[in-house]
Image (tube, rainbow, N blue to C red):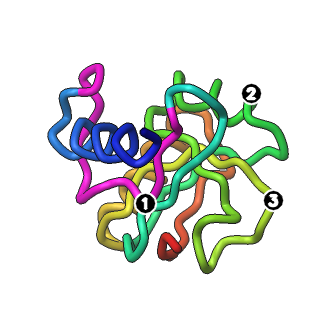
Amino acid sequence: MRKLLSTIAIVAGVTGIAGGAQAFSGPASVEAPDSNVVLASHGSCGWYAITVCTRGWSGAKRATYKYGGYVVNTSHISGFRNGWKCAVKGPTSKWRAKKLARKARHHGAYSAYVKHGCGH
């Protein structure tokens, strides 16, 4: 069941039908609708625009309401430090991630940055 929900969420995110969300090349991980578990999509590599990282889910989730994107558990993405919940957009190209981070900084996420990672 969890695998089915993950597939549905990825398809919805890629096609942009999930609440008018902006479509990317595909999320590296998605938040399962029935829990706070983040399911990583194996092999999803690219650059991420990171707006906010916190130790808890609530702060990162609030950031998605303001800046868009979705929440990832960094323990599921190689290249990211384990144990954080981050509001991100991507994976995408480095150029696009830089543009998204710059836009987020302009709108108040002053510590927004870009980072490369792969779902595992």
Identify the mark at residue 83; answer none if there is no mark.
3
Which element is circle 3 on? Answer: loop
Which element is circle 1 on? Answer: loop
Instruction: Say which amino acid is labelled 3.
Output: Gly
- Which stretch appears magenta? 18-32
Callouts 1 and 3 close, C-beta under 8 Å:
no
Q: Residue at x 81, y 59 (%)?
A: 83
Magenta span main SS: loop
Nearer the observer, 7 or 24: 7
Q: Residue at x 54, y 71 (%)?
A: 115
Nearer the observer, 109 or 92: 92
Label 3 Cα neighbours within 10 Å, binned few <14 / some 14-19 / many ≥20? some
Instruction: Say which amino acid is labelled 2.
Output: Ser
* Mark before the other along the chain sequence, 3 or 2: 2
* Mark before the other along the chain sequence, 1 or 2: 1
In this image, 89 relative to 66: left or right? left
Q: Residue at x 42, y 39 (%)?
A: 1
Q: Residue 46 is drawn in which quadrant?
A: bottom left
Q: Is residue 29 above or below residue 76?
A: above
Q: Residue at x 58, y 61 (%)?
A: 113
Across and down, in percent, residue 119 comes to: 49, 70
In this image, 42 relative to 79: left or right? left
